[in-house]
Image: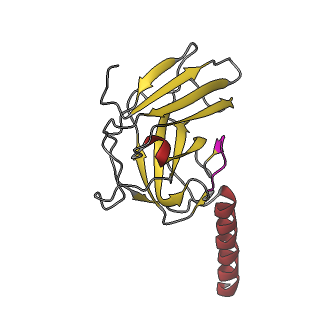
């Protein structure tokens, strides 16, 4: 049996129709095969086993923009066009010394072939218990140029764990209703100022 230095093999199988896409993302982490770990924002502390990870499809082809809120599988993240395919544990794919597998199946008309997908990890949040993210949360993001929702028939992509580490501040993105409310307050304020001046 050949041993490869592949820490993680991701198989993506697609059976897409004109109305919806069906994809299965399966991760296989092999014990004993070293891969580069993912790090917290300091660049030296490895993320803990059980850290919450997200698989996200970028439906707008404009990168991932996380916003604070609940993490609901197979839904858009906040007001962005980023589709949350599913939640995963870092133990399944990153940094675990124990072999493990995890799989996520998705059926959605909101994703299409050749859209990019990303893996996002959230240090400090735990897969088994955390279901939302809040403003100020640090996160890391990993992407490979061949991580795309496949066309009909399916494809396989090898995913190694030498992904870039890092983090960015997660900020609250106001919903459209908030902008309308603020614009209304501004308009009302201008009316009062004009009446006082006249």
Residue at 53 percent of width and 65 percent of height:
135
Provide the residue span drawn in magenta.
69-75
x then y, percent, for residue 99: 45, 37
Instruction: Give coordinates of residue 114: x percent, y percent.
Output: 50, 24
Q: Residue furthest top?
A: 153
Name above or below for residue 70 compared with residue 160: below
Q: Is residue 88 magenta?
A: no
Report the label total.
0
**Residue at the location (40% across, 38% down)?**
143
Horizontally, residue 37 falls left or right of residue 25, namely left
Quarter of the image that includes the N terminus:
top left
Vertical side of 139 occupied by 94: above or below: above
Could you say which is closer to the camera, residue 181 or residue 168? 168
* Residue 162 place in picture, x, y as percent: 31, 40
* Residue 103 in sight here: yes
User: Who is closer to the viewer here, 126 or 100?
Assistant: 100
Foreground residue among 142 and 93: 93
Residue 70 is one of the magenta-drawn residues? yes
Q: Is residue 9 left or right of residue 187?
A: left
Q: Nearer the viewer, residue 131 or 91?
A: 91
Q: At 66% from the left edge and 63% from the top edge, which residue is drawn?
A: 178
Does residue 63 appear in this view?
A: no
Residue 7 picture location, percent across and down? 36, 35
* Residue found at x 49% / y 35%: 117
Q: Quadrant of residue 189?
A: bottom right
Quadrant of the rendering where the C terminus is positioned: bottom right
């Amino acid at each position: 049996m050949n041993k490869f230095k592949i820490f993680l093999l991701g198989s993506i199988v697609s059976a897409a129709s004109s109305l919806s896409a069906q994809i299965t993302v399966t991760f296989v982490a092999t014990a004993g095969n070293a891969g580069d770990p993912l790090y917290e924002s300091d660049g030296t502390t490895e993320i803990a086993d059980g850290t919450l990870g997200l698989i996200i499809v970028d439906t707008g082809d404009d990168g991932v923009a996380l916003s604070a809120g609940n993490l609901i599988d197979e839904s858009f993240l906040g007001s962005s066009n980023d589709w949350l395919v599913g939640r995963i544990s870092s133990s399944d794919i990153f940094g675990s010394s124990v072999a493990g597998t995890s799989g996520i199946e998705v059926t959605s008309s909101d994703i299409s072939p050749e859209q990019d997908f990303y893996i996002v990890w959230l240090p400090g949040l735990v897969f088994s218990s955390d279901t939302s993210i809040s403003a100020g949360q640090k996160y890391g993001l990993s992407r490979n140029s061949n991580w795309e929702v496949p066309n009909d028939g399916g494809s396989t992509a090898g995913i190694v764990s030498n992904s870039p580490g890092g983090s960015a501040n997660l900020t609250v993105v106001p919903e459209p209703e908030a902008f309308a409310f603020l614009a209304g307050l501004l308009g009302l304020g201008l009316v009062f100022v004009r009446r006082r001046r006249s």
